Amino acid sequence: MEINDDRETAAVFEDAVAFAERVGAVSLFPAEERIVRGLMAVPPYELAIMTSSDLSQLSGASRSSIDRLSRKLGYPGLKEMRKALLLEGASREAKAASGEGQNTGQIADRVMQAIAMRAQAFSRSLQTSSDLDTLVEQILNARQICLFGAGESAAVCSAIHLRLVRLGLPMQFSEEHHTQVTLASLMRPGDLAIAVSHSGNTQSLLWATGAAKNAGATVAAICGSVSSALHNMADIRISLPTGMGLPGSAEVLGRIIAVGLAEVLFQCVAAARPDLSAASVRIDDAFAERRS
């Protein structure tokens, strides 16, 4: 496999090289990152009929960026890139359905590899966007911070809450959605609402987030869909990596990666304000006394 380092020129790959490997082997512009996330987010039936115009609207990138990405990944155009993704997805689903030759160790390896791939994609996204810097700044300056999420996304909220409250930050979270709406209604300018949703269209979440925004709070969305109502509503957008991996696991993998964001935020806030780490140390000391 021969790969050019120049981000403007096409790379040459062997036919057997998978889409995700090609993406990992080249350097992408932010617009190209959005295109990749868009391609990997749509279900196969949409991918099969997707046009350049559709993808441009979904990703917010120009058609020329789509053409450039296709060449960079070694495909003549979008049509061939879509076809490769569809074939790879069909092959994975067929193997998973048959369970052929898979023992528990191999299954564990597939799962962990899928998580690692998502984590690397998320890391690249966070590094090429200013949204993480903006979110950390808002966390540091907010009068209070409320977390909103429904179902399994509530577990992500809980993870963020448990990490940031250890820094002495003014955090509030309740899993019960009526309480979330109550907290949202009481917010005001200077507050930060962090909403978590894989789909970005969960009605109970949008109810709470809309109430927070109407009350004047800044809204940060941690979301898996750039075309969702939550993404469009938010002032700060952290996009989770999406796409094909393990059959039926897209939302689960997204939430695992979102839980990792809790530690990213903890470390970023602690690095920006080392004095806040003293609160975490006091908490650790208090637990150590009881555990000894």
Image: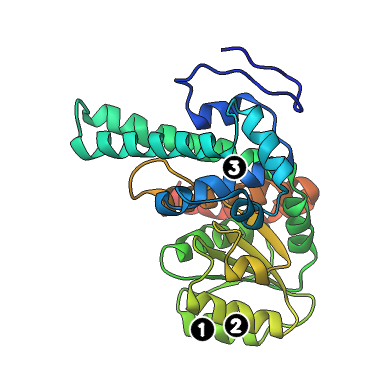
Q: Position of residue 84 (x, y in %)?
A: 46, 33
Location of residue 169 with respect to 174 vertically, above or below: above
Q: Residue furthest top?
A: 2
Q: Amino acid at mark 2?
A: Leu
Question: Would you say the residues marked 3 and 2 are in contact, meaning their CB atoms lie under 8 Å apart?
Answer: no
Real-space CA distance between mark 3 and mark 2, rounded to the nearest whole angstrom: 36 Å
Circle 3 — which element?
helix
The three-letter code of the residue at mark 1 reads Thr
Q: Residues within 10 Å of mark 2 (few under 14, many from 20)?
A: many
Is residue 282 shown to the viewer in this render? no
Disc 3 to disc 1: CB gap under 8 Å: no
- In the image, residue 199 sits, relative to residue 214, either above or below, namely above
Task: Read off the residue under disc 3.
Answer: 36
Residue 17 horizontal side relative to residue 142, left or right: left
Q: Looking at the picture, does residue 216 appear above or below residue 40?
A: below
Q: Cα distance, mark 2 to mark 1?
A: 6 Å
